[in-house]
Image (cartoon, coloured by chain):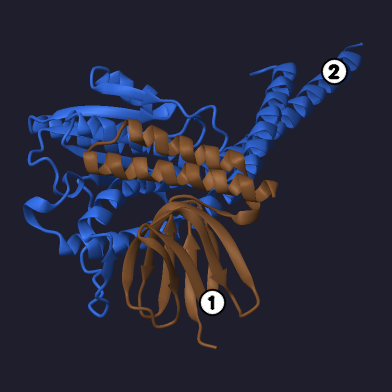
Chain colours: A blue, B brown
Amino acid sequence: MPSLKDLRNRIASVKATQKITKAMQMVAAAKLRRAQTAAEAARPYAERMETVLASLASGISGSSAPRLIAGTGSDKVHLLLVLTAERGLCGAFNSSISRLARDKALALKAEGKTVKIICVGKKGYDILRRQFANDIIEFIDLREFKQVGFVNAEAIAQNVLARFNNGEFDVATLFFSRFRSVIAQIPTAQRIIPAEIPEGTQQTDAVYDYEPEEGEILEALLPRNLTVQVLRGLLENAASEQGARMSAMDSATRNAGEMIKKQTQLYNRSRQAMITKELIEIISGAEAL
Amino acid sequence: MATFKFELVSPERILFSGEIISVIVPSVEGEMTVLPGHVPIVAALKPGVVLVQTSAENGKEFFVGGGLVEVNQTSVTILAERANFIEDVNSDVLDAAILSVETRLAAAPSEVEERRLREMLVQLEEFKHVFEQRKAA
């Protein structure tokens, strides 16, 4: 049976924790709004880009296709680009992305392929490092950026592109968490090299003129498409992270509230029990006289 | 007056969306005015100014740092690599654009791409020069 003082301390400490989680929840809610707007603002560009790319790519076939669409012709070496958060305390956000990447890496290794990993974000790096210490070729830290933007995406895309041109890998896959709603974030794997061209988005009515030629536009468009995909991943991730943190902190606050209620009840009971006990002692003492 | 739907999108946001009567875009093969009923075309853009005519009297200017314009029967869309309202453009913005092209040039995968980026760099620097002169005047 804990003493009254112990109970008082315990209640005070849970209350302090509750204050922190409550504050974190509110901060996450405010940040979520901004991140969500940014993610939604970036969608139209990515969608239009896909449509244009699809209509361009359909006109180009066979050996004339750029390597970013056609691939290198083999799939021996795989690059996994894993985007995670820089901070924890956001529920299963980081671990679910890392798990998806880990499963993929293990599956590829089982097939005898070589796996290389680039981690963006400290948390994913910490998780994956335990198992794939030798496969991680780079860790990109975005901690100093308050809000990730086009500049960051471009730097990452350039990095990946340079490696591709050096022949360091054949296939690249991007791992991030798609933001569905505050309570639903879906860890997603997306192949970025060779580019995935959506089927069935063909418009039959429009036959375009091209200026300059199709091939040349396509050549210029593909690296940019890579940047856009990375940017989309980063922005969706930022929104997902805040959403995950918000719901995690919400349930933490609720749990703390429940615990306070239970402990307070226990405290009051044992205080009353003590008073009753003392009264009995005094009364029986007086009777004995 | 005949109008058509026009959108100017950059990777980070939509800068303009609405009905307009004409738009002048800096295509790589020269400036191009798009009016309603233009033939469908996809053209690459060089860095420069996009002039949007929302009505006979009202125009709006934007800076684009290269990109792509897509014209189809009903609408015109510019996918800009970077875009700003002309009022927000200053030497810093242009310097950032130049720097970004320079880093990409350093990692250019093919000769075609390298040539394209080099051209773009020249165009950007030219634009910066003209822009600064215009501002000083």
Count neighbours of disc 1 (C-alpha within 10 A) and say few if under 14, some if 14 to 19, many if 20 or more. Answer: many
Residue B88 lies left or right of residue A70; in this view the side is: right
As drawn, A256 above or below B86: above
**Residue A39 image position (x, y, % from top left):** 49, 52
Residue A174 shows up from this direction: yes
When asked about the image quadrant of residue B103, the answer is top left
The image position of residue A44, as x and y in percent, is 44, 61
Q: In this view, does A108 lie to the left or right of B43?
A: left
Q: Residue at x 18, y 32 (%)?
A: A169
Q: Which amino acid does label 2 sit on?
A: Ser
Residue A36 is situated, as x and y percent measured from the top left of the image, at 53, 52
Which quarter of the figure is the N terminus of chain B placed in? Answer: bottom right
Q: Residue A211 carries which label?
A: none
Disc 2 is attached to a residue of which chain?
Answer: A
SS at badge 1: strand
Q: How crowded is mark 2: few (under 14 residues within 10 Å), some or many (20 or more)?
A: few
Residue at 16% across / 30% down in the picture?
A: A167
- Describe residue B65's horizontal placement relative to residue A1 as left or right: left
Say which of marks 1 and 2 sits in front. Answer: 1
Above or below: residue A104 compared with residue B75: above
**Distance CA(mark 1)–CA(mark 2):** 97 Å
Residue at the location (61% across, 55% down)? B86
Q: Quadrant of residue B101?
A: top left
Q: Which mark is residue A284?
A: 2
Task: Using the image, tell me which numbered label, if any, was put on residue B20.
Answer: 1
